[in-house]
């Protein structure tokens, strides 16, 4: 294995350990000592890969969002109808939301105190999460559709996030199939396909 490969592997191990600690404790309570122990490295090694806990956290968010974008882009490429697309989006975005719930909570509480460059990275993550849905809307909506695809994507994604979040906040089991049916009923008639 090349030196670059070993470095990348160690970085991934650290990110996986950080995910466990951040998800279990939230950003504020997570300590670099705990992350180092979970990763099986010295605390100083963490700082060879990440300048701060904040930078490690943002890098983890970037990694998770890249995985989501790649997965959802591949699945949406095969969608043929609005109904199918809504079901795919609800399933994948809902799973992403549930899997990363604690990280998402930490973002809203912690990021305002981050340096500007890291806040910009988080904003770019959020924008990146919208791109697959925007591309989908550009593909499936008619050219004369009266609303910009980016706004339609924001409404669809917002509805998914709100619906899944409501289940979680009410301590109810998330039923993604029901969320998909509900959103299809509410949004489907207004989304005219090409």
Image (spheres, helix red, strand yellow):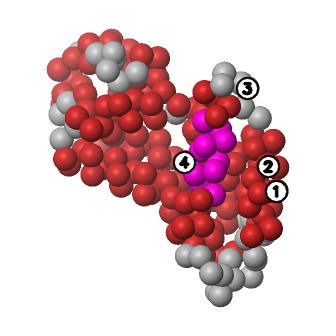
The circle on residue 182 is 2
Q: Residue at x 80, y 68 (%)?
A: 189
User: Which residue position holds label 3?
Assistant: 173
The circle on residue 68 is 4
Q: CA distance from mark 4 to mark 1?
A: 25 Å
Of 52 and 38, nearer the camera is: 52
* Residue 42 at x, y percent in the picture: 23, 15
Q: Quadrant of the N terminus?
A: top left
Secondary structure beneath dot 3 equals loop
- Residue 55: tell me if it is visible: no
- Answer with left or right where residue 137 lies relative to residue 1: right
The circle on residue 71 is none
* Residue 140 at x, y percent in the picture: 69, 75
Q: CA distance from mark 2 to mark 4?
A: 23 Å
Q: CA distance from mark 3 to mark 4?
A: 22 Å
The circle on residue 185 is 1
Q: CA distance from mark 1 to mark 3?
A: 21 Å
Count the marks: how many?
4
Q: Residue at x 43, y 51 (%)?
A: 126
Region rendered in magenta: 156-165
Return the disc, 3 or 4, that comes first in the chain's sequence.
4
Q: CA distance from mark 1 to mark 2?
A: 5 Å
Choose mark 2 or mark 4, whichever is in front: 2
In terms of image quadrants, where is residue 190? bottom right
* Residue 183 at x, y percent in the picture: 75, 53
Return the disc, 2 or 4, that comes first in the chain's sequence.
4
Of 35 and 139, nearer the camera is: 139
Q: Quadrant of the C terminus?
A: bottom right
Choose mark 3 or mark 4, whichever is in front: 3
Secondary structure beneath dot 2 equals helix
Q: CA distance from mark 2 to mark 3?
A: 16 Å
């Amino acid at each position: 294995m090349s030196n670059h490969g070993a470095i990348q592997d160690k970085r991934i191990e650290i990110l996986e350990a950080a995910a466990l600690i951040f998800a279990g404790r939230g950003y504020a309570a997570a300590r670099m000592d705990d992350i180092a122990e979970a990763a099986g490295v010295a605390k100083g090694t963490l700082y060879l890969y990440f300048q701060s806990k904040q930078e490690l956290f943002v890098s983890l968010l970037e990694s998770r969002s890249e995985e989501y974008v790649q997965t959802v882009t591949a699945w949406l490429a095969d969608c043929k109808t609005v109904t199918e697309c809504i079901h795919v989006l609800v399933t994948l975005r809902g799973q992403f939301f549930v899997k990363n719930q604690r990280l998402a909570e930490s973002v809203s509480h912690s990021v305002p105190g981050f340096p500007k460059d890291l806040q910009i990275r988080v904003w770019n993550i959020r924008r990146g999460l919208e791109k697959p849905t925007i591309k989908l809307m550009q593909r499936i909506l008619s050219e004369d559709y009266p609303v910009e695809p980016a706004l339609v994507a924001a409404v669809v994604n917002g509805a998914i996030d709100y619906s899944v979040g409501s289940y979680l906040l009410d301590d109810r089991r998330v039923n993604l199939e029901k969320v998909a049916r509900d959103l299809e009923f509410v949004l489907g008639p207004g989304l005219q396909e090409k």
